[in-house]
Each structure stands twice: as C-alpha cells, then as structure tokens.
Amino acid sequence: MASWIQRIAPRILGNKSKSKVPAGVWLKCDGCGETLYSKELDKNYKVCPSCGFHFRLTARERIALLADEGTFRELFSSYRSGDPLKFSDTKKYKDRVKDAVTKSQENESFIAGTAELNGRKICLGVFEFKFMGGSMGSVTGEKITALAETALKNHIPLIIASSSGGARMQEGIFSLMQMGKTSASIAKLKRTNIPYISILTDPTTGGVTASFAMLGDIIIAEPKSLIGFAGPRVIRETIKQELPPDFQRAEFLLKQGSIDRVVPLPGAQNQNLFGWLRTLYPIWGRLTPPDIYISTQTALAELALSGCTTAADHLYIFPNGCRLDDEIEASKSVGLRLHAARGSMSLGTSKGGLPPDHVTEDEDFILKDSQRLIEQYHDPKPGSKLQITLAPCSPFSVTESLMRESSVLADSYGVHLHTHLAETADEEQFCMEKFGLPPGRIYGESRLVKRSDLVCTFCICK
C-alpha cells in the first residue's frame, strides 16, 4: 500500500516528470572522483584534466590518435572468429561473439592496418577491449601474425597497442597456440632489424603479456596501466603475502626495468598551459628521491656526451621526501657544472592557485630550506661547479609574500632569482583577475619583486 505522502504528492506537485540528463553526458573520474563533461573529456583525449587519470580509449579512437589523419588503411577486416570447440557455458560461444560485435561495432578484438606516423609508413595494430575484453583468439593471433609479416615484407616499423585480458578461454588450446605464433612472427622482425614498438594500456594481462606484448624493442605504457600475467588478487592469495604498492602497475614495472617508459597521452601535451599542468601535477606528485637522482644523472650524462659542460634546472615539486639535494648529488656523479634552482609552490587550489594542495609547500619551510641550500652548496665564484638559484615558480603557484621574501633572500646572499612569467593566454587571464595587471607588467609596476638587476631572459607572448 502506498504511503500517505505518495498518495497526496501528485495532487500537490502535479505529475510533471523530471527532466532527465541523457546517459553518458557526465562521467565520474575513477582517479579523483570528479564529475566530468564527456565532450570536454573527449577533447582532452579522455585524460582527466584534474588528476591525469586515463579513461579507456576505443580502438578507433587510438588509431585516430596515433595515425596521421586519413592515412589508416585497414587490413584483414574479413577475418572472423570460428567456433572450433563448439564451446558453450552459460551461453554459446558463437552467441557471445555476436553480442561482442554488436557491443563494440567491430568484427574482432584486434584491428590491423597500415598508416603513416609523422609522414613515415608504419604497420599499426590496436586491441578493442569492448570485444570480449580484448581477448586473443585464433583470429586475433592470425591478424597479429599477418600484420607482422606485412611489416617484414615492406620493411616498415610495427606498432601494436595492447588492451587485453589475455587468451580467449572459449577457444581453449587454439587460443593458447597464438602466444607462440605471434612471438615467432615478432622474432622474424628482430632478425631483420625492423623496429617493433609495443604500447601497453590498461589492462594488458594474461597470454598477451606473456607473448608479443613484452617483446617490443621499445615498450611504452600509459600511466597506472595494469600489466601482468595473473592478476594481483590471484598472486596475493597464492603466495599468502601482501604485494608492494602499485604492484603490476606501469610505474612499478618501469622501476623494475620491465618497460622502457611511462608516457601520458597527448591530453598532457596539446593543451593550454593550465590544462597541461593540471594533467601533469598529479603525475609529478608521485616522484620519489631515486626518480630525481636517476633522471638527473641520465639527463646530465646525455648532455655531457653532446659536449655540454654546464646545465641549469628548475625543480619545483618535492613530494615523498624529494629534495634539491638529490639533484645536486646526481650532478656530482657526472661532473657537470650545475645551476640548481630551488623552485617553490605555495599557492594551492584551496588558496586560489593552480596546483593541487598536496604538491605545494609551507612558505616558512621553503624559505628555511632555500637558506640552507645556499649556505650548504652555493659557490659564488665565476665558473664554479655548483650555484644555487631561488625560483618561486609563477604568479599562479606562489603567494605574493613568498615572491617578495624570496627576492629579499636572494638579494641578501647575492644569488640569482628565477621565475616563469607571461607564458600563455590563460596565465594572462589569471594575472589580470588576481593583480589587475598583465604578466609582462607585474615586475615593472607591482610590489612582487623589486630588483635593480632584473633581466628578462625568456618570454613567450600571445
């Protein structure tokens, strides 16, 4: 029986139906929980602008992202999955395939073809996860092998982007045989020095990981992608031990040397400055002291090989115990002169700034640490091996008081002061709203910095 409120509410409020928002207009980010407008997310290559979380792309979307516009030519599109075992569980395998075709609008879990990448001819293959979880059956294995043979015949690079749950169980031994088959085709490319680049996206697991996906000459992964053979839950329950944080995630595998790079999508590259930074702040926020040391050592070693003798760097994010000392110690191991800039960010989102609060620092700590670094490391002599620069990052990430105090501190010790200014239109809008001045006039007319030796060395204006 309906309650009294249910009986009288229609008479009071009427029977007007509530307007409904169509499904898919708004999406919730699994990384930070923020609600995102789907059209804006699509423009950002399905990368969350707040935390950098990568939503899953369809195969066609990834092809459009990788290939030069209008150059992709699909191959082997007529290949179709059979049912060699007449397999049936709660549903017949052939019916599952039909459902997968309807759901994904693709004929198989793998799309293969030729394309151009920056004008260079390539063979390109991409998994469609919507088609039975991107599983590898006999047809998928055949298409991968045929694509590798096309690359071999035409002597052009092969690129495969994987997103798969592994071998397709409904085809039993036939699907498992594709592991050896695809691996053998990749081996032919290696013997003839044809490059094979493997891109691992979330998830890449099972028989795909155990075969061609991990055989690339270069292996690239998207941030936070799940990559492994058995899942972490299965491993944990089997060995009865807790697993390391981020186990089987791309960043963990990078530290173990299993992959070559973790690269975010161009959502972090083809943006205005603020969108670019919003994507990268959370990624930089996961840096550790060994990350700083190794990356500095590698970069300086490459510069030394080119004949460079002096380098400068602006380090302004110090998460997880990172310090400028990590960069300094790395420079000593290489032997280059270094002008190390102690960057700073104190104006988080809660105070009206751009960076998330968790990548900013307390102002008193910043000033004390800056003084420590100068007294401990700075050598003012011309041509010295190490000099310290103070570098409050930018008007949108540093408070006015920190900018002024950094300038006073730099003056008192006779060290250089460095900042970023007037980089893009979104910064100009921020400065007009906050200071009532365009970025280029802040130093000349505001109280932020008063220095007689101010020099503008790098400026981009729009």
Image (cartoon, rainbow, N blue to C red):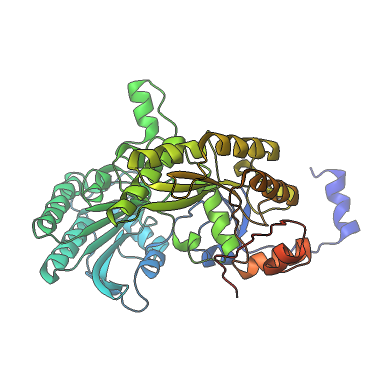
- The answer to which of 340 and 203 lies nearer the viewer is 340
Identify the residue at horizontal 87%, vertical 45% (top origin): 4
Residue at point 35%, 74% (across, down): 68
- Identity of the residue furthest to the right in this view: 12
Vertical position of residue 40 compared to residue 50: above or below: below
Quarter the N terminus occupies: top right
Residue 73 image point, x, y percent: 27, 75
73 horizontally vs 100: left or right: left
Residue 30: in sight, yes or no? no
Provide residue 192's location: percent of width, then percent of height.
Answer: 9, 60
User: Whole-percent x and y of residue 227?
Assistant: 35, 43
Q: Quadrant of residue 430?
A: bottom right
- Please give the name of the residue rendered at 48% of the width and 36% of the height, measured from the top-left corner: 325
Q: Nearer the viewer, residue 382 or 289?
A: 382
State which quarter of the image contains the C terminus: bottom right
In the current view of this chain or complex, which residue is farthest to the bottom?
A: 70
In the image, residue 59 above or below residue 237: below
Q: Does residue 8 appear anywhere in the picture?
A: yes
211 and 103: which one is in front?
211
